[in-house]
Amino acid sequence: MNRLIKIFVIAILFVFTTCKKEKAFPSWDTDVLSPLLKSTLTLKDLLTDSLLKENPDSSLKLIYHSGFYSLVIDSLLTIPDTSLKYVYPPFPISYYHLDSNEIVMSNIGTTNFNMGNVLLSYAKIRNGYIKVETWNTLKQKINVRYSIASAKLNGVPFAVSEQVPAATTAGSVYFTKLYSLAGYDIDFRGAAGDKFNTVSISVIANIDDSVTMHLGDSVVFKNTYFNISPSYAKGYFGKDTVTIGPAENHLGLFDNVKAGSLLLDDATVKLHIDNYTGIDSRVQINSWYSLNSFSGNSVQLASDIIGSPININRAIETGDPQNPVIPSSWSTTLNNSNSNIKGLLENLPNALGYSLRIQTNPLGNISGSNDFIFSDRTINASVDIEVPLSLSAAGLTLQDTVDFSLQTGTQADNVNNGVLTLFANNGFPFNATIQMYMLHANGQITDSLFTENKTIASGMVDANFKVIAKKISKLPVPLSKSKLDLLKNTHRMVVKIKYDTYSSPQLVKLYSHYGIDVRLVGDFNFTVNFDN
Amino acid sequence: MKALYLNLFFVFYYGVTTTFAIDLSLIKNDSAKASISLSGSYYSQSTVLTNAFVNKFILFPGFIDEGLKGVVSSHLKRDNQFGFAIDYGFSYFQKFNHRDFGFFITAKDKQYLNTKFSGDFYNLLMYGNKRFAGTTAAFDGLSLNALKYQKLGTGLIWTVVDTVGKLGFGFSYLNGESNSSLNAEKARLFTSEDGQYLNFETAMTWNMNDTMNRSRFANNGFGFSADLFFEAPFKLKRRSGKMVVSVEDIGFIKWNSSSRSYSVDSTFYFDGIDVSNIFQLRDSVFSSISADSAISKFSNKGKKNITTLVPASFNFYTITNYGKRFQLVKGIHHIFNANYKLKIYANGNIIFSINFLLVLG
C-alpha cells in the first residue's frame, strides 16, 4: 500500500516537473502568395528639392531656386583687435608714500581703431570681447573702475569695478578679466562726437590702504578689444574692390545623376542680384559655368552679361525693426536666344561655378558717411531655373542610397526561400532599367538584388509620343536562404535606375498625370511557428 | 479494507479518437465512511485528424512535416471536426453515520477546444494560399471554441435507492478563466493568379474574454453547473450488471464586462500596404500593422457581457458481468455545445483483482 502511494507521488511530481519545461509550439511550412507593398510614383516622387509647375496643357515644367553667392560682412568691414595701455607712475619714483584711498590713476582716453579708409560711426555688436589686464607690484590692493560711456546695453553704459590683489613677496600680481560686448551699441565718434573709429574710455584706480612705493613699483593697466563683429554698422565703408572666386556652389537639381545624357527643348534661368547694404555697388560677373563632377565636364556661360559692369544702387534703411531694409535689386533672364544656358543645364551639373568682382562706393562717400550694413543682409546672388519637361534621355542614370532594414526577430526570420516580384505598371514614356545593391554596415556591396539588370518597359505612346496606356513589367527577385541572410544584414541599398526615353533623341513631353504603379508581391515558403 | 484503486483507461483509434484517463482512488470498501479520489483525463476526437498529427500539434508540439500533413489532407471531407477536453482534479466523499447517503466535494480544472472546419481551411492553414492561386478557398461554417474554467462543487449521493441503486446530484461554482469563440458564417479567400491581390469575403463573430488578464486561474467570469448521476443494478438472463446514467456540467459561465465581441460582415480587398516611397522601406512600415489594429479597423467591436453554455457531458452505459474476471461495457456518450459527434461504444474490462482492472476497448 505504502509503495503504491510512493509510486503515485513520484508520478505526480514527474508530471509537474516535466510541465515546467520550456513551452514547445507546433510549426510547419506553408507557401504564401501575397501582395506586400504598393506605391504610385509620379514625377513629384522622383524629383527631389524641386517644384513642379503644371502648364495649361497639363505638361510639366521644373522650377528650381538656388542661391549661389552671399557676401559676408567681413569682406566690407573688419574691426581690428586694438589695445590701450596706461602706466602709473608715468615716470620712475624712488620713494613715495600713498595714503589710504589715494587715487593712483584717473585717465579719460580714447581707443582708435585702424580701419583704413572705413569711417565707422556706429556699430551694434553681434559678438566680441573686451579684455582688461592689470599688473600690480604694490604691496596693497587696488580698486579699479573701468567704463566706456559710449558703449551701451539697453541704454546703460558699460562700467565694471574690480579689486586687483596686492603684490606678494614673490613678485607682482597679474589680474585679468574678459567681458562680452555682445548686444552693445557702440558710438565710434569719440567723446565730442566729431570723430570716426574712436571710442572713449575712463579708468580710475585708487589704493585700498596706505602703502609705500619704491623704485620700480608700478601699476599697469591695459584694455584690448578683440574679435569684434558687428550685426549692424554705420559710417562710410570705403571705395573698395572685392574679388570673389573662382568658387563653386552646390546645385541639388541633378545630384543623383551619375551618367547618361539629357536633351532639353528649352531652358530659362533668371539671375538675381539683391543689394541689402546701404552701399552703392558695381558687380562684374567674370565667369559663370556649370560643372558635372562625375563626367568632369564644365560648360561656360556665353552671354553679354559676362564681363559687363552691373550697377546696383544702395538699399534704403526703413527704421522698421521688422523689415529694416528695402533692397535694391537687379535681374536678367538667360534663355536660348541670348545665351547657351540650355547647354549649361544639359551638362547635368551638380555645381554652379562663378567668379565675381564687387566694387563698393564707386562714386566715393556720397552718403555723408551714412552707409549701413546688416550682417545678415548683404549682397546675394541667386538663380531661378525653369525647364519645360520636354526632353530626351539616353542612358540617364540616377543612383541613390536609401536606408533599408529587415531586422531579425521578426516574421521575416521564418521565410525559408521564395521569389519577390516587382510588378511595375509604367505610364512614363521611357524605359527604366533597374538594379539594387545591398550594402553592409561597413558600406561594402554584398550582392545585387536582381540577378541581372531588369528593364521596366515604357508606356504605350501615340504618334506624338504621348503615353496612351500603361505597360506592365514583371521583375522577379529569387530569394535563396543565403540571399535572405544577406538582406537581414543589409542596412542600406544602392538603387540605380537608367532611363531611356521612347525613340530617343526625339523629345517627349512629361505630363502631370504620368506615373508608375509599383507593387511588390511575395511568394514565400514560410515556416509557421506559434512561438514567434 | 483499505486499498488504492487504480483505474487506467486507454483507447486509441488510429486517425479518429484518443482517450486517456487515470482515476486514482484511495477508498475503503462500499460500507466505508469516506473516500478520496484523484482523477485526470484527456480526450480528443476528430473526424479527420490523425493521432500523430494531434500529438505534434497539441500534446507534444513539434514540426509537422509534409507526411503528417498529407495523410490528413487525403482524408478531408467537406466538413471536418476536431475537439479535445482535458480535466483533472480531486473529489472527496463522506458518508453520514447510520445513513444511506453522504456528501461529496469536488474541485476540477477543465479545458475544452473544439473546431469545425472545411477541407479548404485545413489546406489553407497547413499549405498556404499559394495552392489556391486563381481560385477561392472557402471555409464557410468555420467555428472554433476554446474554453477553460475551474469547477468547485458539492452534492449528495444516496448509496441505496430502491434497495441497491445509487442516485446523486451536485451543484458547482464555475470560475471562468478564458474563453474564445469564433464563428464564421461565411469566409472565402480569393488569391489572384499572380498574387497581386487577395479578396476575403467574410461574415463572422469573435467573442473573447479580457486579454489583459491571462494568469493561471484568472477570474474573467463566473457561472454555475449541475451534475446528475444514477446507477441501478440489473440481472438479465442470469447475468448481473448495472446501468449508469450521468449528466455532467449542465450550466453556464457569464464572462465579465471586459469581454470583447467582434463582428464583421464585409469584403476585404488587399493589394499591398500603401507606401509613399517604395525605396524607403523600414520596419516601421510593417510594424504599424498588427493583428489587433487590423481587427479594430475592420470590425465592429464592443465590450459586453457574454454568456457561454459550458459543454455538458451525457453518458449512458451498462456493465454486464461475464464471470468474475470479465465485464462488457456498452454505452453512448455525447458532449453538448462542443461540436461533438455522438459516440456509441463497447469495451471490456478484465478484472485481475479488486485493486486492478484492465480496460480493453
Image (spheres, helix red, strand yellow):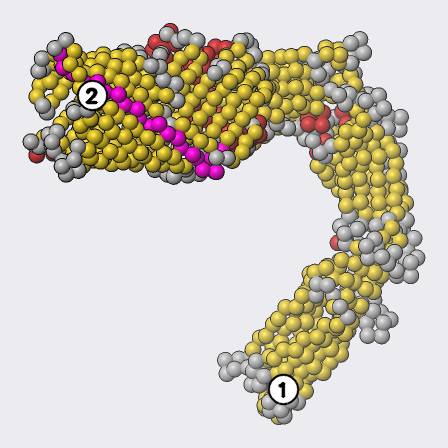
Q: Mark 1 lies on which chain?
A: A
Q: Is residue A192 left or right of residue B314?
A: right
Q: In which quarter of the image is the N terminus of chain B?
A: top left
**Residue found farthest to the front:** B162
> Which residue is the extreme one toward the top?
B74
Q: Is residue B246 magenta?
A: yes
Q: In this rendering, does residue A491 appear at all?
A: no
Q: Is residue B31 above or below residue B339?
A: below
Task: Estimate the x, y position of residue A381 in percent, counting from the top left.
Answer: 80, 42
- Residue at mark 2: B232
Looking at the rendered structure, the kind of residue marked 1 is Ile
Q: Determine crowd level at label 1: few under 14, some 14-19, many 20+ residues with C-alpha closer than 10 A.
A: many
Q: Which residue is depicted at the point 53% across and 80% down?
A: A171
Residue placed most toward the observer, A444 or A49? A49
Question: Which residue: 66% across, 28% down?
Answer: A256
Q: On screen, A27 above or below A211?
A: above
Vertical arrangement, residue B27 with respect to residue B76, above or below: below
Which stretch did the figure color magenta? Answer: B239-260
What's the residue at 73%, 15% (across, down)?
A429
Q: Give residue B279's position: percent from left, percent from top.
A: 60, 26
Residue A311, picture quadrant = top right
The image shows residue B289 at horizontal and vertical percentages of 54, 30
Q: In terms of depth relative to the viewer, which is nearer, A294 or B189?
A: B189
- Write the residue at 88% across / 61% down: A369
Q: Which residue lies under the disc numbered 1?
A: A207
Tag in front: 1 or 2: 2
